[in-house]
């Protein structure tokens, strides 16, 4: 007799969706979360806190950050107002391989990174699902766009996605709420690009942020710092969306502060029988049982649990007969380029738009194109108006100097970040250290990650094409990033792979429904299942595949 | 769920960010008890740090320089924003030991700039001293175009560091953010609004240099 029908490990984007779907289909579900509780609304303590109330007026506490958060503090969204949501790197360390660094950005709260994410949501296309099959890198995807499209629609209708329909085959439209307004400058740029680089598409970012009330959640009020939590529930988070839906069924139990250490299986090695956890507050060990287990502990976290569940029957880690577990770790290498624009300088803006614009992939859309790299990249584009923060470093004193700081500066910064697809590479790995363990007795994660030649060659195009875009857009000056300065793996926070899906159990960990080939009641639906990386943000795909996996699990109970 | 109505002070705090009449969901305009407790405990951060680093002449010198950088005129200046206390707090608690030592030396050198001592010079003489210090620092990288988005320039000459602390202390204060700059009104997003001569830049919610640190 099991304690629960299903156990979901992790409460972030994927775990929240698994909890919602499984409870709504009648299952009694336990969610185990390693982080601390953060309750919707009440625990968003810094929401709307003005800068002068933040420690050191929001300037980073360099000593403390270097000691407690050396990894997390490198993240754009980490600051004095929300550091309590992020992983403490001193208490929860991992080991990087020298010369093959991987930056593991983690939350340590209920809701996981769904509270902290940048909310960009893009569908994958058939081009993405065909990529591995067409060029031979990685294993072919066992799922087509047509199979997953209804699930994209299903999750989009629930979470709310604002954006503009463009009718592109390689970036299919979502079920859209109205798009956000563009800056005047962006409209100028859009017009120029459409004339000078007509094959590019320039569209407002597609974001899981509400532009009108939706499913009981408020429309965005454009206050700005989403990553502190939003009491209006205006962006998708587990707290605002999936966990309340799961709770409403009366069948959800969520326990925070529970680090899942490993899974136990039956004598035949074909079923998980229990989930072993340690209470982070008491150190007490506990076993939880259920008929079904969903790992949604994040790409690295879920793989760590499986690797640490090895047994006589599963000597290389649970469900790892393929030896693919822990391999083919991916992220999106990126370069950020900046241009200076003096158009629309007589205009300003009102409200903080939590969104940018997007230039979808335009390379290798058809087989006739001839580049020295495979696959492609897209640019996320953000506008920033110059102010005193750019030019206070000048001479002068008194009233004139003071006045020079008051108004917006006479130009805009337009930043283009090119996010590239990376190829699945068996040398990019997550493994467990043979003898070093964390404070819960779990072997430490060891990461090893490098970009391949394809990513490096694509970076040249990413950089040179950015220059072309700046010239076409009318930038008076621009700085293109050195293609040799690709971001460290993991820092796009789009880590994927390490328990990939595929039709062949000899080369993949999961089947096309995210179920283990070897363990019949085990599903992995966070980023670990991804067989390739596309160049678009992956969270929406985690949601769609999770919902689909839940339906499959329930049908096969 | 614990939803309490705002008291007046808290409402004003929220309202500082809400100058449009757009419809905003009631949940946004109310704060949880935990949020209210946080706001109470985290009024101006300067009130929550003990500072006892500077001597009286050092305090006086920092305040005098702050007034020279950001005077009070038709809008409040460094005095109203308590910038001298900001400087002392940052130097005592935020600087590294090496940065602190270097800064204190610079401050003492300024105080002893000549036989009359900086604090006792008249305003015009003080200004000349500050201008000549800045001229002496001309070669420093601190003045480079765009060298503003790093977290801190530990190698910058004393006069440059002092000026940067004054600017940060003023612009990130409640006075600077609401009576000199203006909070960006929330409630809606409009991408093109005509910029009028009297308009100020939007106040910061988090210093830009913090966001910039992740950009390669």
Image (spheres, coloured by chain):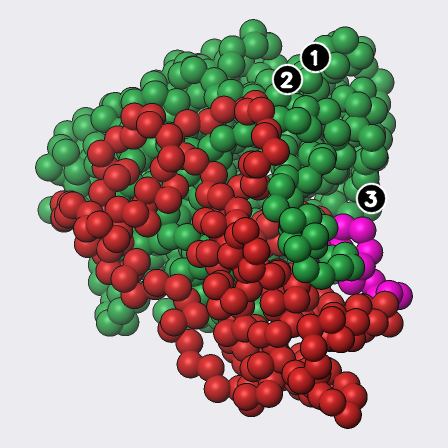
Chain colours: A green, B red
Q: Secondary structure at mark 3?
A: loop
Q: Residue at x 70, y 52 (%)?
A: A400
Numbered disc 3: what chain? A
Residue A406, how many percent across, how many down? 61, 46
**In the image, A153: left or right of B213?**
left
Q: Secondary structure at mark 2?
A: helix
Q: Which residue is mark 3?
A: A482
Residue A503, how many percent across, how many down? 50, 26
Numbered disc 2: what chain? A
Circle 1/circle 2 CB separation < 8 Å: yes
Q: CA distance from mark 1 to mark 2?
A: 6 Å
The answer to which of marks 3 and 2 sits earlier in the sequence is: 2
Q: Identify the mark at residue B59; answer none if there is no mark.
A: none
Q: Which residue is mark 1?
A: A191
In this orientation, which residue lies closer to the viewer: B194 or A432?
B194
Q: CA distance from mark 3 to mark 1?
A: 28 Å
Which image quarter: residue A392? bottom right
Q: Identify the mark at residue A187; answer none if there is no mark.
A: 2
Q: Is residue B144 magenta?
A: yes
Numbered disc 1: what chain? A
Which image quarter: residue B199? top right
Q: CA distance from mark 3 to mark 2?
A: 28 Å
Judge if badges 1 and 2 mark residues of a common chain: yes
Which dot, 3 or 1, sits closer to the camera? 1
User: Going by the picture, which residue comes out furthest to the bottom?
Assistant: B115
Magenta segment boundaries in residue numbering: B138-148
């Amino acid at each position: 007799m099991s304690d629960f029908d299903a156990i979901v490990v992790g409460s972030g984007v994927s775990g929240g969706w698994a909890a919602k779907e499984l409870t709504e289909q009648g299952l009694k579900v336990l969610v185990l979360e390693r982080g601390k509780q953060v309750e919707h609304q009440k625990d968003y303590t810094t929401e709307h806190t003005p800068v002068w109330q933040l420690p050191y007026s929001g300037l980073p506490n360099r000593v403390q950050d270097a000691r407690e958060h050396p990894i997390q503090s490198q993240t754009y969204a980490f600051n004095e107002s929300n550091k309590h949501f992020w992983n403490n790197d001193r208490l929860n360390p991992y080991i990087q391989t020298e010369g093959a660094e991987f930056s593991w950005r983690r939350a340590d709260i209920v809701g996981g990174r769904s509270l902290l994410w940048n909310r960009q949501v893009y569908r994958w296309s058939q081009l993405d699902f065909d990529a591995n099959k067409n060029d031979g890198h990685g294993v072919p995807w066992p799922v087509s766009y047509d199979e997953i499209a209804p699930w994209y629609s299903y999750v989009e209708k629930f979470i709310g996605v604002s954006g503009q329909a463009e009718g592109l085959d390689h970036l299919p439209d979502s079920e859209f709420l109205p798009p956000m307004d563009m800056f005047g400058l962006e409209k100028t740029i859009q017009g120029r690009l459409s004339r000078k680089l007509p094959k590019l598409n320039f569209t407002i970012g597609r974001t899981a942020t509400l532009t009108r009330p939706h499913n009981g959640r408020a429309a965005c009020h454009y206050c700005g710092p989403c990553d502190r939590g939003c009491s209006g529930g205006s962006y998708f988070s587990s707290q605002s969306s999936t966990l309340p839906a799961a709770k409403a069924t009366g069948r959800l139990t969520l326990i925070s502060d529970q680090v899942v250490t490993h899974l136990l299986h039956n004598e035949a090695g074909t079923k998980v029988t229990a989930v072993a956890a340690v209470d982070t507050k008491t150190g007490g060990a506990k076993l939880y049982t259920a008929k079904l287990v969903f790992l949604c502990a994040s790409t690295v976290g879920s793989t760590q649990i499986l690797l640490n569940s090895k047994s006589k029957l599963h000597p290389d880690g649970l469900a790892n007969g393929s030896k693919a577990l822990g391999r083919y770790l991916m992220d999106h290498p990126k370069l950020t380029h900046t241009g200076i624009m003096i158009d629309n300088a007589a205009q300003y803006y009102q409200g903080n738009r939590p969104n940018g614009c997007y230039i979808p992939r335009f390379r290798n859309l058809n087989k006739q194109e001839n580049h020295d790299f495979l696959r492609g990249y897209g640019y996320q584009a953000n506008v920033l108006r110059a102010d005193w923060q750019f030019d206070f470093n000048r001479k002068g004193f008194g009233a004139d100097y003071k006045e020079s700081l008051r108004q917006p500066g006479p130009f805009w910064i337009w930043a283009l970040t090119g996010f590239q697809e990376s190829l699945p590479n068996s040398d990019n790995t997550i493994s467990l250290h043979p003898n070093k363990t964390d404070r819960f007795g779990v072997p430490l994660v060891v990461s090893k990650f490098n970009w391949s030649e394809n990513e490096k060659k694509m970076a040249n195009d990413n950089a040179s094409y950015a220059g072309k875009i700046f010239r076409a857009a009318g930038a008076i000056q621009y700085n293109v990033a050195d293609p040799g300065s690709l971001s460290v793996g993991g820092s796009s926070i789009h880590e994927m792979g390490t328990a990939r899906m595929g039709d062949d159990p000899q080369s993949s960990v999961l089947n096309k429904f995210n179920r283990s080939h070897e363990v019949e009641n085990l599903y992995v639906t966070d980023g670990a299942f991804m067989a390739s990386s596309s160049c678009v943000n992956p969270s929406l795909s985690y949601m769609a595949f999770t919902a689909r996996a839940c339906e499959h699990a329930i049908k096969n109970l | 769920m614990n939803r309490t109505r705002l008291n007046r002070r808290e409402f004003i705090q929220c309202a500082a960010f809400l100058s449009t009449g757009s419809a905003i969901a009631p949940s946004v305009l109310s704060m949880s008890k935990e949020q209210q407790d946080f706001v109470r405990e985290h009024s101006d951060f300067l009130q929550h740090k003990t500072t006892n680093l500077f001597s009286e002449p050092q305090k006086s010198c920092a305040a005098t320089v702050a007034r020279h950088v950001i005077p009070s005129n038709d809008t409040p200046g460094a005095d109203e924003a308590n910038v001298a206390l900001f400087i002392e707090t940052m130097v005592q608690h935020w600087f590294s030991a090496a940065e602190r030592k270097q800064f204190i030396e610079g401050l003492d050198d300024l105080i002893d700039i000549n036989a009359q001592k900086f604090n006792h010079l008249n305003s015009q003489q003080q200004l000349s001293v500050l201008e000549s210090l800045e001229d002496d620092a001309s070669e420093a990288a601190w003045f480079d175009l765009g060298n503003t988005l790093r977290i801190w320039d530990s190698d910058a000459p004393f006069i440059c560091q002092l000026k940067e602390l004054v600017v940060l202390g003023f612009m990130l204060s409640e006075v600077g953010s609401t009576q000199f700059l203006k909070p960006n009104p929330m409630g809606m997003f409009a991408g093109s609004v005509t910029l009028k001569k009297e308009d100020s830049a939007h106040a910061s919610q988090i210093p830009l240099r913090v966001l910039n640190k992740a950009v390669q």
